[in-house]
Image (cartoon, rainbow, N blue to C red):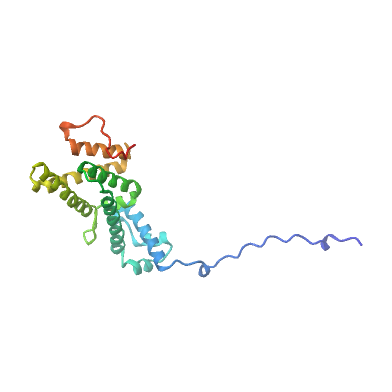
Amino acid sequence: MTERPEDIAQPRPPVPPPTLSPKSRVRMSAAQRREQLIAIGRALFAERGFDATSIEEVASRAKVSKPVVYEHFGGKEGLYAVVVDREVRSLLDRITNALTAGHPHELLEQAALALLDYIEAETDGFRVLVRESPVMSPTGNFMSVLNDVAHQAEHILGAEFKRRGFDPKLAELYSQALVGMVALTGRWWLEVRKPKKEVVAAHLVNLAWNGLSNMEGKPTLVTGAGK
């Protein structure tokens, strides 16, 4: 018996995968959502600053409603405070952990490199810190970090001044000058990104350690970080 075409089994079309409804999607935990909002806020504050960033845009990028952001942070000021606090602690930890040498010259190198490392690795975080903080913000900022670093440098310089017979009371002045010089250079390097950070650090230390009258033509880091 001859089979008719309609009697021959036809291949079935592929079955598309089931479409997940919004309710069936995996939802973030509260902790995951908070981290997502912090990351989005960090990027927006770095790009636009505090005043130009809105809760509406934070919520839009996170694909949540505004009340979700308010629930986690109470408002834009609360989100900003969390972002800045994290960056302050991150930068301070980097610098503190970098200060391992015993000689002041190497300590200066390590501090300069730690700041430049942070700028390179955490560019958005650094941009948040160096932007002007809102007046109502009770949180720390870049200046508070620099003051903390300067206080650490003051103790190091004070001991060195005393050993050399200089007035240790001047250590505070010199520590502020040194930290300020490194910080302003870091802000400049943030935009130009050249020369390499090791070269920048070497020249910073060259100026700070040798002074203009004794500057070397081609300074290098004694710690060997640039090799």
- Residue most extreme to the top: 217
Q: How many marks?
A: 0
Say if residue 29 shows up in the picture. yes
Image quarter (top left, top right, bottom left or bottom right) of the C terminus: top left
Residue at 17% x, 48% y: name it: 156
39 or 199, which is in the foreground? 199
Foreground residue, 34 or 166? 166
Q: Is residue 122 left or right of residue 161?
A: right
Quarter of the figure with residue 220: top left
As drawn, which residue projects farthest toward the right? Answer: 1
Q: Where residue 59 appears, x then y in whole percent?
A: 39, 62
Q: Residue at x 23, y 53 (%)?
A: 145
Q: Check the picture and name the quadrant holding the N terminus.
A: bottom right
Does residue 195 sit above or below 35 in this rendering?
above
Q: Quadrant of residue 105?
A: top left
Q: Residue 79, position in %: x, y?
A: 31, 62
Q: Residue at x 26, y 52 (%)?
A: 96
196 or 156: nearer the viewer = 156
Relative height, residue 7 to residue 163 (above, below): below
Residue occupying image coordinates x 29% and y 47%: 114
Across and down, in percent, residue 197 comes to: 31, 40
Where residue 136 sits: x, y (%)?
A: 22, 62
The answer, for residue 184, to whether it is visible in the render is: no
Figure check: 49 above or below 188:
below
Q: Which is nearer the eye, 64 or 198?
A: 198
